[in-house]
Amino acid sequence: MEFDNSIILAVFLGMLLLLVILFLGVMIAGALAPRPSRGAPLIASEDGHFEVAGKRISCSHCGGSEFSVNQILLNTWLLSLFRIDWLDASASVLTCVKCGQLTWFNQDSAKVDE
């Protein structure tokens, strides 16, 4: 029984495509799975001050206590390769209003209910 090279190539490419789809499915399912708690939340007050685990945050450079907060995406090379960066985790980054130093936290920021 003889096989045509085009049939062998088509079967190989089909199997490769199936593996890529399976791999992407596993990556997306893992990224969408609930993540464990990351410790005490980063709590923001109305006046631009923040605290974690009951301690008020102050700038390690200038001692300032007023910050602005941003959520930064923690990109991984694999999800960036497939252009699905939005599945990556994020971190809260505080920027000191006085000097501009960045302070990173692995917790989600939360507003204080007053």
Image (cartoon, rainbow, N blue to C red):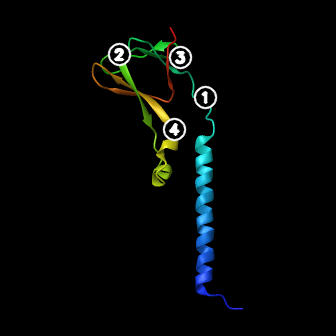
> For the point 38% across and 16% down, which residue is it?
58
For badge 2, the amino acid type reads Glu
> For the point 58% across and 43% down, which residue is it?
31
Q: Give the mark, 3 or 4, whose residue is nearer the N terminus.
A: 3
> For the point 50% across and 13% down, which residue is it?
112
Q: Give the mark, 4 or 2, whose residue is nearer the N terminus.
A: 2
Report which quarter residue 14 is drawn in: bottom right
Q: Is residue 94 visible?
A: yes
Q: What residue is disc 4 on?
A: 89
Depth check, front residue: 35 or 14: 14
> For the point 57% across and 28% down, which residue is it?
38
Q: What residue is disc 2 on?
A: 66
Is mark 1 in CB contact (under 8 Å) with mark 3? no
Q: Secondary structure at mark 1?
A: loop
Residue located farthest toward the bottom when viewing the structure as drawn: 1
For badge 1, the amino acid type reads Ser
Residue 21 higher or lower than 30, as above or below: below
Q: What residue is disc 3 on?
A: 53
* Mark pair 1, 2: CA separation: 26 Å
Q: Give the mark, 1 or 2, whose residue is nearer the N terminus.
A: 1
Residue located farthest toward the left when viewing the structure as drawn: 99
Q: What residue is disc 1 on?
A: 37
Residue located farthest toward the top when viewing the structure as drawn: 114
